[in-house]
Image (tube, rainbow, N blue to C red):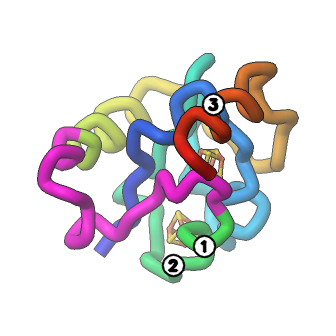
């Protein structure tokens, strides 16, 4: 089952996940990243790399975050691919602290 990026990524975009992904499934906007469910090979490598625990397997997404499954699919259809780690957003460290990590 594909993996999904959820709201904790907003304002962080650390992109440690991209560095370990063996295929090209991450797409980006100005706020966060998204996983293309058609490209994800369900390896699970990205999940433990996220410093703010934003990534879940789709069957494990908490109920209140289920909308992110469809959002990931929709966003990937329109946004550019990201294939390399990039600098986190300027707000990343503050957001991480705010989230309790
Ligand atoms: S590692 Fe986590 S916070 Fe960073 S881009 Fe990936 S999902 Fe977002
Ligand atoms: S589960 Fe594997 S293939 Fe899917 S996004 Fe994460 S690292 Fe990439």
Quick check: is the Cβ at mark 2 less than 8 Å away from ligand 2?
Answer: yes
What residue is rendered at 48% in x and 52% in y? 54
Q: Which residue is mark 1?
A: 48
Residue 17's x, y, as percent? 67, 59
Q: Is residue 28 visible?
A: yes
| Local crowd size for mark 3, using a 10 Å CA cut-off: few (<14), some (14–19), many (≥20) | some
Q: Nearer the viewer, residue 50 or 40?
A: 50
CB atoms at circles 1 and 2 under 8 Å apart? yes
Q: Which residue is mark 2?
A: 44
Q: Which residue is mark 3?
A: 95
| Local crowd size for mark 2, using a 10 Å CA cut-off: few (<14), some (14–19), many (≥20) | some
- Which of the two discs, 3 and 2, labels the residue nearer the N terminus? 2
CA gap between label 1 and label 2 equals 8 Å
Q: Residue furthest bottom?
A: 43
Viewer-nearest of discs 3 and 2: 3
Residue 2's x, y, as percent? 35, 67
Asked if residue 15 lies left or right of residue 4, the reply is right
């Amino acid at each position: 089952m594909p993996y999904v990026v959820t709201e904790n990524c907003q304002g962080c975009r650390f992109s440690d996940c991209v560095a370990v992904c063996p295929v090209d499934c991450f797409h980006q906007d100005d706020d966060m990243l998204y996983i293309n469910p058609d490209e994800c090979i369900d390896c699970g490598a990205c999940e433990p790399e996220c410093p703010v625990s934003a990534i879940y397997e789709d069957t494990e997404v908490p109920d209140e975050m289920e909308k992110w499954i469809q959002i990931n699919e929709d966003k990937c259809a329109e946004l550019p691919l990201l294939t390399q780690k990039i600098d986190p957003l300027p707000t990343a460290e503050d957001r991480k602290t705010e989230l309790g990590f």
